[in-house]
Amino acid sequence: MWGSRVFHCPYCHGYEATGKSVGVIGGKNPAFTFKMASLLTKWSESVTLHLNGLDPTKEQLQKLEATGVVLDRDGVVRVSPAAENDTSVEVMTASGTIRYDACFTGPDFIPNDQLLRKAGCTVVDGWVSVEGGKTSQPGLWAVGNVVSSPDQVSQAIGTGAGVAIAIDQFLFDEEFSG
């Protein structure tokens, strides 16, 4: 159901949820999940967050309440395609089954950065640290979702183009430095 009924990003898929009932399932990315649930109220008046074991802070609860997100504290037992509809999702909890037109969840973003880590690049909060694309290791540059979780393909392409120019200028200056 990933990408057709279950989504991960309100900016990528919020429009598709316009005017629809939306279920959000808590998971391995609590901060992102709470923010996502609130953001989805920009497109839908019916957003339910299944905490699924997540424990929001007082501030997070206030924001969820202020944006109109309904909270369901039951654990999610199963998520499945709705039998009678080719686009809906059914979320089963201990209290019963709820049908949604769209479902979102905060995924666990895991950068594919093993080579950069093995090379000794500094990692901060789980992401390779860069300044203008430069890593902590001389001659190694990085862009995209190894340096920032929200980087999408289009952002990575743009940043990559800018960093490619910086690399070219760096190499040029290095070649002709006295």
Image (cartoon, helix red, strand yellow):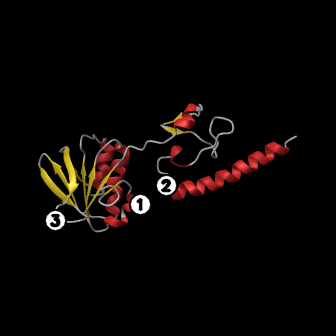
Residue underneath mark 2: 152
State the count of labels: 3
Mark 2 neighbour density, 10 Å: few (under 14) some (14–19) many (20 or more): few
Q: At which x and y percent is residue 67?
A: 30, 57
Q: Earlier in the sequence, mark 3 or mark 1?
A: 1
Residue type pointed to by label 1: Cys
Secondary element at tag 3:
loop
Residue 87: % across, % down: 25, 64
Distance from Cα at disc 1 to Cα at disc 2: 9 Å
Q: Residue furthest bottom?
A: 19
Sequence-wise, the earlier of marks 2 and 3 is 3
N-terminal of the pair, mark 1 or mark 2, is 1
- The amino acid type, in three-letter code, at marker 2 is Gln
Of discs 2 and 3, which sits in the foreground?
3
Specify the quadrant of the image occupied by residue 118.
Answer: top right
| Residue labelled with disc 3 | 84
Q: Is residue 54 left or right of residue 77?
A: right
**Residue carrying label 1:** 12
Image quadrant where one finds the C terminus: top right
Quadrant where the image shows the N terminus: bottom left
Quadrant of residue 15 in the image? Answer: bottom left
